[in-house]
Image (cartoon, grey):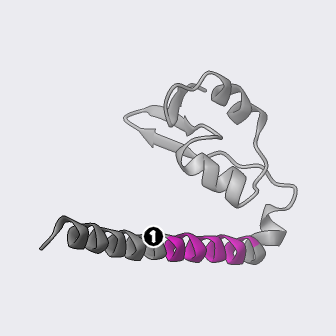
């Protein structure tokens, strides 16, 4: 096989992956839209925090990271003041919080 043949095969494979990626993104966006519609009356004017409690410690997801992006950006839940505060100094997806 020539180098040109290999380059052509590479382009075809890349194109197939690109189309797969576009489908995954499209499917995700449809799922988000459907979930927002389904939860509209529960989400409207509501705030929420995503907590992970383990070994007597609590961790809160930052609003612009990880599942925070899904909850706040995609699903459009309001961001509580504590999440805003914790997110300002967050250096990872999850920040330790204390009661």
Horizontal side, residue 17 vs residue 48: left or right: left
The quadrant the C terminus occupies is top right
Most foreground residue, 27 or 40: 27
x 65%, y 30%: residue: 87
Most foreground residue, 1 or 75: 1
Write down the quadrant of residue 32 in the picture: bottom right
Give the x, y percent position of residue 85. Answer: 71, 26
x 52%, y 77%: residue: 23
**Principal SS element in the magenta part?**
helix
Q: Are there few (<14), some (14-19), or many (20+) residues within 10 Å of tag 1?
A: few
Horizontal side, residue 10 vs residue 87: left or right: left
Q: Write the start and end of the magenta stretch as one range.
A: 22-36
Whether residue 52 appears in magenta in the rendering, the answer is no
User: Dot 1 lies on which element?
Assistant: helix
Which residue of the protein is positioned furthest toward the right in this rendering?
45
Which residue of the protein is positioned furthest toward the top in this rendering?
89
The image shows residue 55, relative to residue 3, as above or below, that is above
The image shows residue 54, relative to residue 38, as above or below, that is above
The image shows residue 3, relative to residue 84, as above or below, that is below
Q: Which residue is disc 1 drawn over?
A: 18
Give the x, y percent position of residue 9. Answer: 27, 74
Counting every numbered tag in the picture gives: 1
Horizontal side, residue 82 vs residue 59: left or right: right
x 79%, y 66%: residue: 42
Horizontal side, residue 55 vs residue 99: left or right: left
The image shows residue 90, relative to residue 47, as above or below, that is above
Give the x, y percent position of residue 1. Answer: 12, 74
Whether residue 34 appears in magenta in the rendering, the answer is yes
Give the x, y percent position of residue 2. Answer: 15, 70
x 76%, y 57%: residue: 76
């Amino acid at each position: 096989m020539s180098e040109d043949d290999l380059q052509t095969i590479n382009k075809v494979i890349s194109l197939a992956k690109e189309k797969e990626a576009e489908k995954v993104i499209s499917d995700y966006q449809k799922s988000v839209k459907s979930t927002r519609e389904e939860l509209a009356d529960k989400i409207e004017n509501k705030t929420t925090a995503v907590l992970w409690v383990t070994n007597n410690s609590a961790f809160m997801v930052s609003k612009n990271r990880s599942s925070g992006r899904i909850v706040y950006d995609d699903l459009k839940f309001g961001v509580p003041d504590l999440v805003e505060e914790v997110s300002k100094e967050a250096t990872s997806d999850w920040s330790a919080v204390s009661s």
